[in-house]
Every structure is written in C-alpha cells, then in structure tokens.
Image (cartoon, helix red, strand yellow):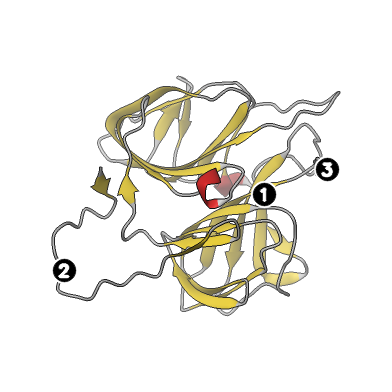
Amino acid sequence: MGYLNQQVGYRKDLLVNRSKVVHGRYALIEPDGCVINQIPGFVNCDVTILGSPLMGAHFVDYLVHIHPNGFNNGFVEKDCQTFMYVVSGECVVNDNQRLTKGGYIYCPVDSPLSFRNDQEEDCVAFLYKKKYIPIEGYEAHQVVGNSKNVEKIHYEGMTNVEIQNLLPSATDLGFDMNFHILTFQPGASHGYIETHVQEHGALLLSGKGMYHLEGEWMPVQKGDYIFMGAYCLQACYAVGEEELVYVYSKDTNRDIAL
C-alpha cells in the first residue's frame, strides 16, 4: 500500500484533513491521505477506491492512474455495468477505441472493459461499477464519446450553470444510471438545496467551491471526491476565478424495490 500523493514520513505541519465520512449519508474525500490499493487485474496501475458499499453507496468509484504500459485486460463483475471517464492523458479501450481527455466509455452488464496506456505519460481515469437492474423489454448498449462533443444545457433555467448528459438514459429506459458533468461559472450555485432518492459519486475536475452536505457547508476543490447518499441534502456555490466542474453518476429509470 502506498499514498496517492506520494508523501511519506513526518510533516512539518499539523495532522489536518478536510475529509469527512458519515457512513450511509455522505462523504468528502480529499486526495491527501488516500491510499493506493493492489487489485488483481490492474497491471502497472495505482488504484484508489473512493466510493463503495462500505460507506453506504450502491456502486464503487475508483481513481486509476494508468502508468505507461499499464493495463487491465478485462474489468468486469457478474451482473455489473461499468463506466470510465478520462481525467487526463489518453488510453486505448477494448482494443480499438482511443480515449483522450474528456473521453468516456460505458460497457453494459457483463461486458468486459479493457484498457491500456500506450503513451509515455500517465493516464488518469475515473472508473465506476454498479449492479445493473434489468427490466423486461429494455437493455443498455455500449456508449463511447467525449465530453467536448456533448451539448451543454442551461441547468434549470440558470445561464451560468450548465449540464451535460453523457449517456442516453433520458430517452432510453435500458439505462438505469447516467453520468453528467456540471459546470458552474464563478459565483454560480444550485437554485435550491436538493433532496432526492438518487445517489451520486462525484469527482471535481476543476475549480473551488463550498458544498452543502446535510446542513454543513464544506470547502471543496479540484481533485476532491464527494459521495451523496439517498436523501442527502446537497447544493454548492462556485468560488474563486475558475469554473467549478465535476463529473458524477446518478441512478435513474427504476422504481424502488421492497
């Protein structure tokens, strides 16, 4: 086991950290203190597990640093679907698709996702898996794209907040989840504090802000990870001079089973 930020030994400063985990409700995890996990199948990769059922999520989120010549020849788990978003660098997925920064791939249930880094620089990827909930007459399909080619839509009537839908779940009931990117201009915010059953796992791609999680306003910035459980009160403000941007998952298109 190693540390994501490569810092070891004693530090000159106090032991402080912005991370906070309230099991089953929400979590804010900053990069400092995150560890690297050895997981079979990930070769020459540094893998950090961010969100998981152990904190109350019904999915698993990973941050993967794929070093040059790093690869996974078949990331798959029975009954699960997977999604990969490239934060930086580039890699080849499923042998013939090249993803650059902002690129993504969705693999439907029980379809292996393979990737390899054939470049001289690291590729950093946000990786996700979740049990698929089938419904009769519908099924999901592979999707490959890049966020730079996805339409930006004004979010709930606000011209300084934009959303991108990376998957077609709004029109295709075969998908039981979606990935979105939200972009807040400096000073922009949600229009209200949200309360809903859908869970989120979010990785901040740029900027700084203040995030409301169940009554507490917490400072966040690029590189942070946020888990929001069902009915977690949530909203954010963008602060500073840079856009606040994050990519996040959302379960959708399914009833709640009893």
Report the amino acid beneath label 1.
Lys
199 relative to 17 in the view: left or right: right
Question: Could you classify mark 3 by the number of other residues whose Cα lies within 10 Å: few (under 14), some (14-19), or many (20 or more)?
Answer: few
Query: Which quadrant is the N terminus positioned in?
Result: top left
Q: CA distance from mark 3 to mark 2?
A: 49 Å
Q: Where does residue 190 sit, x and y in percent of width and height?
A: 67, 72
- Picture mark count: 3
The residue where tag 3 is placed is 255
Q: Which comes sooner in the sequence, label 1 or label 3?
A: 1
Q: Position of residue 88 (x, y in %)?
A: 39, 47
Query: Would residue 222 be found to the left or right of residue 111 on screen?
Result: left
Nearest the camera: 29 or 70?
Answer: 29
Instruction: Kindly identify which numbered label has been placed on residue 35.
Output: none
Instruction: Work out whether 88 lies above or below 172.
Output: below
| Residue topped by disc 2 | 11
Res 101 → quadrant: top left
Mark 3 touches mark 2? (CB < 8 Å): no
Q: Secondary structure at mark 1?
A: strand
For the point 67% across and 68% down, which residue is it? 233
In which quarter of the view is residue 235 placed?
A: bottom right
**Residue at disc 3, secondary structure:** loop
Q: CA distance from mark 1 to mark 2?
A: 38 Å
Q: Which of the marked residues, 3 or 2, is nearer the chain's N terminus?
A: 2
Inter-mark Cα distance, 1 to 3: 14 Å
Q: Amino acid at mark 3?
A: Asp
The disc labelled 2 sits on which kind of residue? Arg
